[in-house]
Image (cartoon, helix red, strand yellow):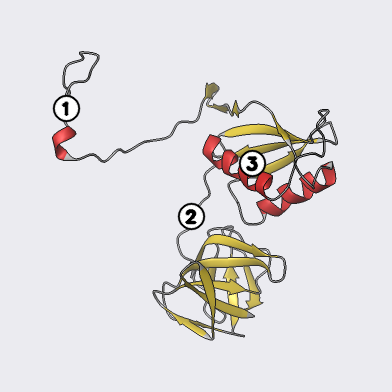
Amino acid sequence: MQITSLDYSSFLGRIAVGKVARGTIKENQNIALVQANGTIKKSKVKELYTFMGMGKKKASEVTAGDICAVVGLEDFNIGDTIADAENPEALPVISVDEPTMSMLFGINNSPFFGKDGKFVTSRHLRDRLMKETEKNLALKVEDTDSADSFLVYGRGILHLGILIETMRREGFELTVGQPQVLVKEIAGKKNEPFEILVVDVPGEFMWQGNRHGYPAQR
């Protein structure tokens, strides 16, 4: 099974999620964790869960084709393979997309401090952001020269916006800076990130011009 997603529980710790490609995984089974760099670590499955609706259901065994959550593994990442303990075999490695944008998160230092939330200190803010990185691998958090602010890297406005709204609903008070696009130097040239967008539309709306008078293009 290849680990394609992560979950986190304050009671169970980090949870590996993926689809079983071949064979079976059983509760309390000894397994080999094959990491992306080729390192093989011996480990043990403590608990198994399958997904039902919006929740999880405990299972004693999962077979090929099942999507499951594995509890008990340590130091794993996206792309690692859970394999047979005696004959470990790695599946092709997958990678997590790099962040494309950053925002500065800080405590609320306005005159209205403490009126909208119950978690207002830099310790509260830092602990919450670090907890998010346990299950949100596309997110990165760095300390800054100021103890009251942190640099948060994400996949875009929507990615960071969801985090901000979630924290606000949980009772966190924070300030955010203006989003900054990350520029990466490749072969001596500065490059900006871009996304490839595919739009599916009904056939009757294809091959038409638009209200600006541009000719229809195929």
Viewed as shown, does residue 187 lie left or right of 166? left
Q: Would you name the residue on which mark 1 appears?
A: 218
Outermost residue, front direction?
A: 115
Pinpoint residue 68: horizontal percent, then vertical percent.
Answer: 50, 72
Q: Would you name the residue on which mark 3 appears?
A: 164
Badge 3 or badge 1: first in the primary sequence: 3
Q: Would you name the residue on which mark 2 appears?
A: 94
Pinpoint residue 69: horizontal percent, then vertical percent.
Answer: 55, 71
Label 1 crowd (10 A; few <14 / some 14-19 / many >=20): few
Q: Considering only vertical position in the picture, is 84 above or below 142?
A: below
Viewed as shown, does residue 217 lie left or right of 80? left
| Residue drawn at point x = 21 percent, y = 15 percent | 214
Quote the CA–CA distance across marks 3 and 2: 28 Å
Quote the CA–CA distance across marks 3 and 1: 40 Å
User: SS for tag 2?
Assistant: loop
Quote the CA–CA distance across marks 2 and 1: 35 Å
Q: Amino acid at mark 3?
A: Ile
Q: Nearer the viewer, mark 3 or mark 1?
A: 3
Q: Amino acid at mark 1?
A: Arg
